[in-house]
Amino acid sequence: MRQQLKTIRVGDKQLDLFAHDVSTSPPAALRPAAPQVPVIAPPMAPVTTPASAPVTVLPPPPAPLPSPPRADDGPPLRQLQLGQHLVEFALRRSTRRSIGFMIDDNGLRVTAPKRVTLAEIDNAIRAKQSWIIAKLQERGERKLQRQQRAPVAWHDGAQLPYLGGDITLRLHQAQRHRASFQADTNELHVWVTPSGTELQLKEKVKSWYQQQARSLFEQRLDLYAARLGVRYASLSLSSAGTRWGSCTIERKIRLNWRLIHFALPLIDYVVAHELAHLLEMNHSPRFWATVATIYPDYEGAKLALKKRSQELPVLFG
């Protein structure tokens, strides 16, 4: 899920599932003291060898924070020095009434009203620099962890994550296109042609995952919406790297189809979280109290979701 924070009021933002701060402060590196060097005094004076003071070496510059991509025809990225970090961000003007920040795996994006000056935008960023730097570092660490996980080997018998467990991939050579899940054996059967590529196989499996996700998400949304006494306008699937869900003031809910990898209680937590935003478009104590009315153990689910997301194998890159 992407993460977003506003400085003035809610406006038309999409709310992120995670909003806790992290902080990192790398220690300074010290180089061993320089050796003692004899100093030759003038004639008739005694020879002294004063000890040299330790030489302190500044820590190396931190790894660059993620920067948002820019289309060839888009405006250049802006830069702002925040302490020891040079932060690049994409700036977009809109008719909104407040300055909004959005952080994802690609970096920081800022949306601001047309009437706001660049100096005011820079000051708004500086006012939130601790939060922005912490979130950028957190996103970078998550992205690195995903890159370091071994990818799934796509062959007959491969184990794929599904609803908190594993299912077995079974491959067949035929012209049939639709994947089929056999619940009694816990196997996903996929038909491929002899000349088929791994990319085509992945797309078939992904399509099956997404079909299952949409069907299940609709069921759970309807169940928890009735319990909360709310109605949502629409459901759409997202493919965000780490953002699990979002809700807009138009009552549109987006859920990451990759949630289908997790056990049902974790899916229900995200569903309850986004539905609660229909009543509280923030992460205030009132919001969490609303979540608790339909999902009491939201704290445990939040931690479990974060831990489980770091353990998932790399399926589709």
Image: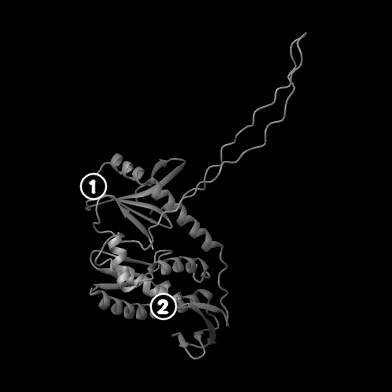
Pointer 1: what residue? 114
Find out whether the residues at labels 1 and 2 contact each other: C-beta distance under 8 Å: no
Query: Callout 2: few (<14), some (14-19), or many (20+) C-alpha neighbours within 10 Å?
Result: some
Kind of residue indicated by mark 1? Lys
Name the residue rendered at 41%, 78% in the picture: 264
Q: Position of residue 249 (x, y in %)?
A: 24, 64
Q: Which mark is residue 130?
A: none
Can residue 309 be seen at all in this image of the molecule?
Answer: yes
Relative horizontal placement of residue 46, taking residue 180 as reference (left or right) = right
Label 1 element class: loop
Q: Earlier in the sequence, mark 1 or mark 2?
A: 1
Extreme-top residue of the structure: 44
Q: Among all residues in the image, which is located at the extreme bottom?
A: 184
Q: Position of residue 34 (x, y in %)?
A: 69, 31
Point out residue 44 in the picture as x, y percentages from the top left corner.
78, 8
* Residue 100 as seen in the image, left or right of residue 310: left
Front-lying residue, 205 or 72: 205
Q: Amino acid at mark 2?
A: Leu
The residue indicated by pointer 2 is 264
Q: For the residue labelled by badge 2, is the local secondary structure a helix, a strand or a loop? A: helix
Q: How many marks?
A: 2
Residue 72 appearing in the image: no
Q: Is residue 263 above or below residue 114?
A: below
Q: Quadrant of residue 53?
A: top right
- Front-most of residues 48 and 216: 48
